[in-house]
Image (tube, grey):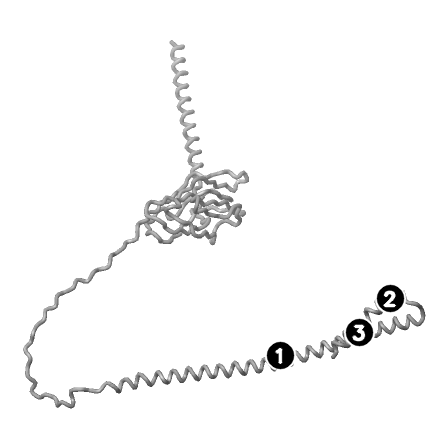
Amino acid sequence: MEEIIKTQIAANIGRIGTKFLVAFSLILVSFSVLGASVEAASLIISPSSRSLTEGESFSIDILVSSPDQTINAAEGTIYFPPDKLRAVFISDSGSIFNLWIKEPSFSNSLGAIDFSGLVLNPGFAGQTGKMFTVSFQARAPGSAPVAFANGAVLANDGNGTNILSAFRHANYFIDSPLIIPPLKAVPQEKKLIETPEKPEENPPPPEAAVTPQAEPLLYVIQPTNTINRFISLIILLALVVIIWYLWKRSSVMSEELEIVEMEMHSRLDILRQDIERRVKHLEELRSKRELTSEEEEILGELREELVKTAWHNR
């Protein structure tokens, strides 16, 4: 009997131990799940939806959210329908990134946007951090989803752990522009009401019935003549100014030419004096000894140059 009781007690203790281990394991799993959710990060497109009109321009922000874990890098690829949207411009003004491994760029033929950036120490942690802004133009009516194709958010933990857990995409709805046809005026029939003519009590005299219209014509002609005279005076003054300017310019140019000519003559005189000095030196050398063929050739060339300079001085 005692052995049966001991056996039952051992079995109960085993069941209790098993239940305790299962409960402890569930607690550990829940803590790990909570820890993972606390340290999770997400990539966001904002706003997530919007109604647009064909041809309208708008902008979206590409954000990263990591409220409980400091990050130091993020990257990704975003797809958009190129038949519905056309990317126009990307701006990183106000970005949390300090450096770009790959600056944000777009391809309208592929309908893709790529980026990869870094945040220097101490990194970034917060609900929303703007990475960059994309400007679009709505091209055609329909639904235009803008979504992440892939991405990564790296923790600033020394290991570069990817803590990305979710993407938050966007979808935009484009309508055709509302065209209001012009209203057509409905012609209304005019009813003619005949009224009996009343005889005039005091008819005007025949002289006052016709008024001359020649006098207003004089007032129309006179301003035109004044304007023509004024334009002629302006043209005459412009011609006088142009003639004066050309005369003044020609006098200045003649003075400049005289200065240049004097300077040229001065330089030619210096050159001629130098050639004469060299010719005199060679002739003195000839009186002492017979010149070589090379010296004779140089002497002949110097005499020719001396003749040329003398001709230029004329």
Find the distance from the CA under tag 1 to the CA under tag 2.
45 Å
Find the distance from the CA under tag 1 to the CA under tag 3.
31 Å
In the image, residue 264 above or below residue 45? below
In the image, residue 236 above or below residue 296? below
Q: Are marks 2 and 3 in contact (CB under 8 Å)?
A: no
Horizontal placement of 16 versus 205: left or right? right
Q: Tag 1's secondary structure?
A: helix
Callout 1 environment at 10 Å: few (<14), some (14 to 19), or many (20+)? few
Using the image as rendered, state which of residue 23 and residue 104 is in the foreground. Answer: 104
Q: Tell me the quarter of the image containing the N terminus.
A: top left
User: Where does label 1 land, which residue?
Assistant: 253
Q: Tag 3's secondary structure?
A: helix
Q: Amino acid at mark 1?
A: Met
Callout 2 environment at 10 Å: few (<14), some (14 to 19), or many (20+)? some
Q: Amino acid at mark 3?
A: Leu
Which is more N-terminal, label 3 or label 2? 2
Query: Is residue 279 in view from this perspective?
Result: yes
User: Where does label 2 land, which residue?
Assistant: 295
